[in-house]
Amino acid sequence: AESREAPFYHRTILGMTRAIDWLAKEPYADSSRFVYYGCSQGGGFGLYLPAMWGRFAKSLILCPNKCDMLAYRAGRQPGSSHIMNQKPEKIAAAEKNAPYHDNCNFAQMIRTPVRMVYGTADDNCQTIGGIAAFNRIASKDKRLQLLSGVGHGWHTAGFEAWLFSLP
């Protein structure tokens, strides 16, 4: 992407934040009971949106993508960047703009309770990138559950009851 505003994620993050703001103002909505629940790309948005909107009661994030996207520069496995899968002439621009949409940067703004689940055999959203994002979550109430030998997908590790138990 030529600029940080060009990628799909930029407009989508801002648009979804505005949509949640709009819904929270509706008289029939109790925004104190809003929770976030998502997997993969939806899990990635589970780091973007609680950081940007900041008023979710809780978040359950399953195998989020877009975590630690430039880790390969330090010899680590990236969470799911796929930057190197682009045409060579586009890699420099992708690397320049990746930090703007990297969930490790958003995680440090999250202060609401979070539960994150990863399968250790996930080859789509690698666990190590998610751990990097989890370690940066600012919330004092956070928990990471690693499921040994489990691949990519909707593995809640029993946290659904926690997510929906609101006062």
Image (cartoon, rainbow, N blue to C red):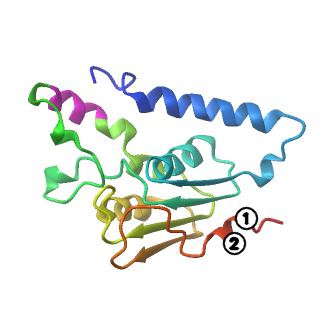
Instruction: State the residue at coordinates (67%, 65%).
Output: 163
Q: Mark 2 and mark 1 in contact? Answer it, CB < 8 Å.
A: yes
Residue 3 screen position, x and y as percent: 31, 21
Mark number displayed over residue 50: none
Instruction: State the residue at coordinates (84%, 42%).
Output: 29
Magenta-highlighted residues: 90-97
Residue 77 screen position, x and y as percent: 21, 59
In the foreground, 157 or 30: 157
Query: Where, by quadrant of the figure, is residue 23 drawn?
Result: top right
Q: Residues within 10 Å of mark 2 (few under 14, many from 20)?
A: few
Residue 102 screen position, x and y as percent: 36, 44
Q: CA distance from mark 2 to mark 1?
A: 5 Å
Instruction: State the residue at coordinates (38%, 70%).
Output: 119
Q: Amino acid at mark 1?
A: Phe
Q: Is residue 6 left or right of residue 109?
A: left
| Residue 2 in magenta stretch | no
Q: Residues within 10 Å of mark 1 (few under 14, many from 20)?
A: some
Secondary structure found at label 2: helix
Q: Amino acid at mark 2?
A: Ala
**Quadrant housing the C terminus:** bottom right
**Quadrant housing the N terminus:** top left
Question: What residue is disc 1 on?
Answer: 164
Number of marks in the image?
2
Above or below 1: residue 125: below
Question: What residue is disc 2 on?
Answer: 161
Above or below 14: residue 41: below
Residue 107 screen position, x and y as percent: 47, 53
Q: Is residue 127 left or right of residue 72?
A: right
